[in-house]
């Protein structure tokens, strides 16, 4: 295995494989984030009865009850139906945010802070935000389109006012050691080049992929379908596979 692997990565990988744990302990470690029975009961009760509740009453019930299981929920937050939370106490959501239907927010880890969602952030339907002992920060007014995937095993931040169109994929970490004799499906750790930042007021077109270490500067635009493999300077337009800067933006 590569030396960049962390002990925390190994622990997470073994959550559901440790035969010394009961199924209830495995479930709590993977989904809930602790083994406190009272919190387990709250999580199960709220998600079972209110997660799928339809209509305006469903929005109202989730607004009242989800703060009981999440780390923090600000004023005026809207939760769609069929949202999945894992390690919910590591998820904080500020005023005016909207989490649309069928999203997953997974903040699992042993030593991470988890997920911070700023004011007036919109996370589109069926989007997945998840970490593997990493952190995700969405600053104020970020807009995440339909079916986006945002992953972090390190540090990932998306700056204020940035827009991701539908089906974008952003990854901080997530690489495997292709030189290893161990099969990819059996490798237990992940390699990361370091933190990944998408700056303020950026626009990523539909189906853009941003790979580990490929930070994007403030005010930049990435063309639809592009694959960003290395850093993009501020106020640049980049397109292609791999993405290349084609012009600068003069405002």
Image: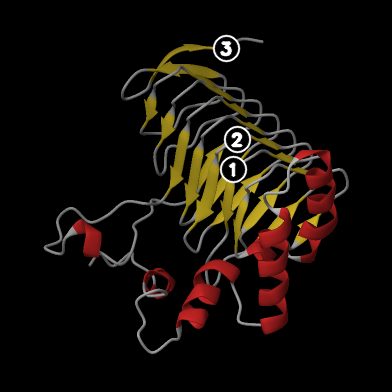
Element assignment for label 3:
loop
Q: Give the x, y percent position of residue 25.
A: 51, 82
Q: Quadrant of residue 228?
A: top left
Camera-side mark, 2 or 3: 2
Element assignment for label 2:
loop
* Residue located 71% across and 59% down the image: 49
* Residue located 78% across and 52% down the image: 62
Q: Residues within 10 Å of mark 1 (few under 14, many from 20)?
A: some
Cβ atoms under marks 1 and 2 closer than 8 Å:
yes
Give the residue furthest to the bottom. Answer: 20
Q: Quadrant of residue 199?
A: top right
Residue named by callout 2? 125
Q: Give the x, y percent position of residue 6.
A: 38, 70
- Could you tell me which quadrant the C terminus lies in? top right
Can you tell which mark lies on residue 249? 3
**Residue 162 in view (yes/no):** yes
118 left or right, relative to 224: right
The Cα atoms of the two marked residues, 1 and 2, are separated by 6 Å
Q: Residues within 10 Å of mark 2 (few under 14, many from 20)?
A: many
Q: Give the x, y percent position of residue 168.
A: 48, 31
Give the residue furthest to the left. Answer: 181
Between 84 and 219, the one nearer to me in the picture: 84
The Cα atoms of the two marked residues, 2 and 3, are separated by 31 Å
* Residue located 59% across and 43% down the image: 102
Between 23 and 186, the one nearer to me in the picture: 23
Q: Residues within 10 Å of mark 3 (few under 14, many from 20)?
A: few
Can you tell which mark lies on residue 117? none
Q: Give the x, y percent position of residue 7.
A: 39, 75
Residue named by callout 1? 102
* Residue located 35% across and 18% down the image: 240
Element assignment for label 1:
loop
Between 83 and 199, the one nearer to me in the picture: 83
């Amino acid at each position: 295995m590569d030396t960049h692997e962390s002990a925390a990565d190994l622990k997470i990988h073994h959550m559901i494989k440790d035969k010394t744990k009961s199924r209830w302990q495995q479930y709590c470690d993977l989904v809930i984030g602790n083994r406190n029975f009272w919190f387990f009961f709250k999580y199960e009760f709220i998600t079972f009865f209110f997660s799928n509740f339809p209509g305006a009453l469903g929005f109202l019930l989730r607004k009242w009850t989800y703060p009981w299981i999440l780390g923090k929920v600000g004023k005026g937050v809207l939760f769609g139906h069929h949202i999945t939370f894992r390690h919910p106490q590591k998820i904080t959501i500020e005023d005016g945010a909207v989490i649309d239907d069928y999203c997953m927010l997974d903040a699992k880890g042993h030593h991470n802070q988890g997920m911070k969602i700023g004011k007036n952030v919109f996370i589109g339907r069926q989007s997945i935000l998840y970490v593997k002992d990493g952190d995700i920060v969405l600053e104020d007014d970020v807009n995440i389109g339909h079916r986006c995937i945002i992953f972090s095993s390190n540090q990932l931040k998306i700056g204020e006012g940035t827009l991701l169109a539908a089906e974008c994929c952003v990854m901080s970490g997530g690489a495997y050691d292709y030189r290893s004799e161990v099969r990819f499906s059996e490798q237990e750790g992940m390699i990361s080049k370091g933190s990944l930042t998408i700056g303020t007021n950026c626009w990523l077109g539909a189906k853009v992929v941003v790979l580990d270490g490929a930070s994007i500067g403030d005010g930049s635009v990435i063309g639809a379908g592009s694959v960003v493999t290395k850093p993009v300077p501020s106020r640049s337009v980049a397109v292609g596979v791999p993405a290349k800067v084609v012009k600068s933006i003069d405002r």
